[in-house]
Image: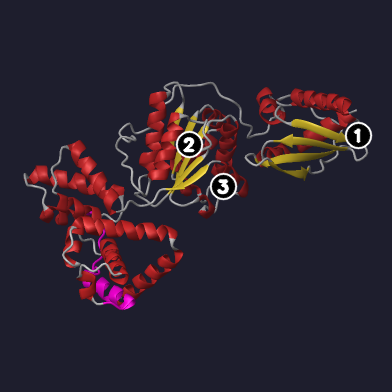
Amino acid sequence: MQQSHKLLWDNFLKLIQRNVPEQTYKTWFEPIVFERYDEERSTLLVQVDSPYVYEYLEEHFVQLMGWALNQSFHANVRLTYRVVTDKAHKITQEFESDEPADIESVPASNHVNKAPDVLDAALPQQLNSQLDPKRTFDNFIEGASNKLPRTVGLSIAEHPGKSTFNPFFIYGPSGCGKTHLINAVGVHIKKMYPQKRVLYVSAHLFQVQFVDAKLQNKINDFINFYQTIDVLIVDDVQEWATSEKTVATFFYIFDHLFRLGKQIILASDRPPVDLAWLKDRMLTRFSCGLIAELEKPNVQLCVDILESKCRRDGLKISSDVIQFIASTANGSVRDLEGVINSLMAYSIVYNSNIDMRLAERVIQRAVKVDNHPLTVDDILDTVCQHYKVSQQNVFSKSRKRDYVLARQISMYLAQKFTKMPTSRIGQLIGGRDHSTVIHSCSAVEQRLKVDKAFVEELNSIESSFRLKHA
């Protein structure tokens, strides 16, 4: 009996196909799977592969489908969707269709039946990828703060659209290297797969293009173009906070590309849950791939970045100056690059060596530094009071647990708040060398990642010396 109902369903599809453009039919109706028809309840159950397909069908085609069901099944059929909400765990949910208004017939097939925002496929065109060829994996230095995003990005670049990391959503504070990383992915893909259509676009430019297309009545052309992309990379998506129509159009493009297995990479200064414009259905899509945080680089990574840049640019800068710059740049790769470029310019113009005096002069102009910075003594005093130890205990070579902990935390906080080079911090805290300070900072950072009680303890110490310094 179900076989005859399947024939009625096939007839329903033929009626739909006559009344919508071919691309619309292939995109939205052809993938629908017939499951069963309950004759007693006049209920038809079909399966679609995402919540967005269900929502789109209900929003744009409920009248047409109601008419086609009546014509084919000769009954007032109630449509129910089985929606795949989690492909990985094969979780589905059922939704009932809205009741269509009474309709006796639909007009003959013409463009009036075409939904205004249907995503038609476009013919491939010559494409400028807008990638920066200088931002590659070779000069994206790996460290603890970026190891996961960099590793995933390289995996995507090797096999775009074929990994489980689709979409790939990267977030992190300004200056941490997000734009460099997503460019590196695109550059690597173009190198390995020259035939692929890769496009890097800022969220702002995407919005400008959308508004321009709307003013010129060329929205379909705009959408058609983006449908041809194999790897779409969008930067700074937090800028769409007040652009509801831009977001809606992007999501149509996003879902179309996602359904075709095209790679999508997005970057933002905050995680998806903190983006007010992001709807639940979009959050669901992002959760299907990978959301990765790109943290600010620690001092050691800043040192590695600076040394790498110096080698590339042929600069000779002493380790003390590099340590000072790394400690002062507020964990911003952008600030690091700006300082190095300024040092190089000053050195050439004034024919002078790049020394600590020049570095301090450039830092004052290039990096925002507190007018009344904390001192190492401020930090030592607060830490020692908290752990009930003396500064002499901290300065000593004793390996007693409380002494070691107070020493490491003092070095970590000094590195974080004083902007001093690690060599100078080491000298002020017991005459240690810079490697001891780096090791201490790393030990504290690792513990902060796994020990919530330690996080609260350190926050309490920071609050104490900030109150004293206020």
In the rendered structure, which disc, 2 or 1, sits on the residue that comes first in sequence? 1
- On residue 244, the disc is 3
Q: Amino acid at mark 2?
A: Gln
335 w.r.t. 441: above or below: above
Residue holding disc 2: 209
Q: How many marks?
A: 3
Q: CA distance from mark 2 to mark 3?
A: 15 Å
Describe the element under mark 1 as helix, strand or loop: loop
User: x, y (%) of residue 156?
Assistant: 46, 34
Q: Nearer the viewer, mark 2 or mark 1?
A: 1
In contact (CB < 8 Å): disc 2 and disc 1: no
Q: Is residue 364 visible?
A: no
As for residue 388 lying within the magenta part, the answer is yes
Which residues are drawn in magenta? 366-389
Is residue 267 toward the left or the right of residue 75 in the image? left
Q: Can you tell which mark lies on residue 75?
A: 1
Instruction: Say which residue appears at 17% left-offset and 61% top-offset.
Output: 424
Residue at (79%, 44%) from the top-left corner? 98
The residue lying toward the viewer, choosing from 4 and 345, is: 4
Q: Is 93 situated above or below 7?
A: below
Q: Residues within 10 Å of mark 3 (few under 14, many from 20)?
A: few
For the question of whether residue 142 can be seen, the reply is: yes
Residue that protrudes farthest toward the left in the picture: 351
Residue at (80, 40) in percent of width and height: 80
Q: Position of residue 278 (x, y in %)?
A: 56, 49
Q: Is residue 35 above or below residue 242?
A: above
Q: Please, what is the three-letter code of the amino acid marked with disc 1?
A: Ala
Colour pattern: secondary structure
- Splitting the image into 4 quarters, where does residue 22 fall? top right
Which amino acid is tagged 3?
A: Glu
* Nearest to N terminus: mark 2 or mark 3: 2
